[in-house]
Image: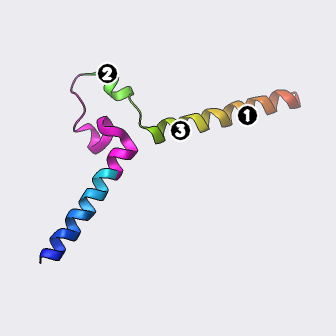
Amino acid sequence: MGRILIIGAIVLAIWAGMEIHTYGINGAFNGLFAPAGQAEAEAIKSTPQRAGDAVTRAHKEAEERQKRALGE
């Protein structure tokens, strides 16, 4: 019984860590720990989210450059 509880606690800790790492402390757990009433708390993004936004922006810029180069 003790082993099951320990394994469950480890799985829970890993899940919580992944949630916080992915969404940041303000976005994790659907904003449960986010400061209430602060609009800037919603604007805070985690590192993976900012990196994804940068990649998406770079793809869009590359498509625009390619369209201009082809004369479309």
Label 2: element kind: helix
Q: Residue at x 27, y 44 (%)?
A: 29
Q: Amino acid at mark 2?
A: Ala
Q: Which mark is residue 51?
A: 3
Q: Which residues are magenta?
A: 18-37
| Dot 1: element | helix
Q: Which residue is mark 1?
A: 62
Q: Which corner quadrant of the image does residue 62 belong to? A: top right
Residue at 80% in and 33% down: 66
Number of labelled discs?
A: 3
User: Percent from the top left, x then y, of residue 41?
Assistant: 31, 27
Q: Residue 33: x and y, percent?
A: 22, 37
Q: Is residue 37 left or right of residue 18?
A: left
Mark 2 — residue? Answer: 39
Label placed on residue 27 = none
**38 or 21, nearer to the observer:** 21
Indicate the amino acid at tag 3.
Answer: Ala
| Label 1 packing within 10 angstroms: few (<14), some (14-19), many (20+) | few
Q: Secondary structure at mark 3?
A: helix
Q: Residue at x 30, y 42 (%)?
A: 28
Q: Quadrant of residue 32?
A: top left
